[in-house]
Image (cartoon, helix red, strand yellow):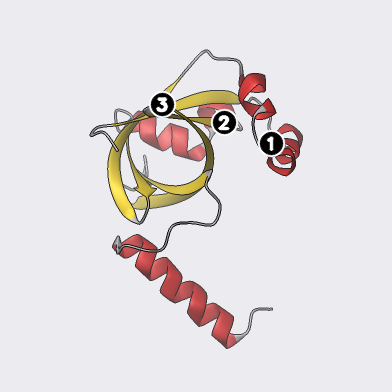
Amino acid sequence: MATLAQSLGQAVSRLIVVGGWPVMQPVVRYATTIETVDAQTGAPRHHMITYLEEGARWLVIARHGRRTDFVRDARADEGRIKVLHYGLWRDAHLRLTDADPQMLIDQMPAKTARQVRRLSTEPRVVEITFDKPL
């Protein structure tokens, strides 16, 4: 069970991220938060993703293919998402690709790759492209 100090710290951290205030560079270079609009309620939803940066685009594994929450929400909103990049929210678009997910999984850190292999039901590669260059 979390202590009061831990709970307050997590609440403040979430408020900073959701508020869009600049924060320190993340320790994990290949993970970030994306924001989608919920397909049913219209409320903003935040999802943690791991990605591989390839030029001006990011590649992400959607563990359950089209049924993955962030993919379903983004596709309902014409692929529009927001990506937290170095403390600032950036507009981007998401699309499913026909690329081989195994290629991307093999390039992930070993622990992350094992987890993706174990928990995925229908892995698909998702491409995130930013509206403005980074």
Nearest to N terminus: mark 3 or mark 2: 3
Pointer 1 with pointer 2, Cβ within 8 A: yes
Find the residue positioned furthest to the left.
132
Residue position marked by numbered label 2 in the rendering? 61
Under mark 2, the amino acid is: Ile
Under mark 1, the amino acid is: Val
State which quarter of the image contains the C terminus: top left
Residue sitting nearer the eye, 33 or 85 = 85
Disc assigned to residue 9: none
Q: Residues within 10 Å of mark 2 (few under 14, many from 20)?
A: many
Separation of marks 3 and 2 at Cα, in angstroms: 17 Å
Nearest to N terminus: mark 1 or mark 2: 2
Residue position marked by numbered label 1 in the rendering? 116
Residue 15 locus on image (x, y percent): 37, 69
Residue 96 locus on image (x, y percent): 46, 21
Residue position marked by numbered label 3 in the rendering? 55
Q: Residue at x 38, y 62 (%)?
A: 17
Q: Nearer the viewer, mark 3 or mark 1?
A: 3
Under mark 3, the amino acid is: Gly
Residue 51 locus on image (x, y percent): 52, 37
Residue sitting nearer the eye, 102 or 76 = 102
Residue sitting nearer the eye, 84 or 64 = 84
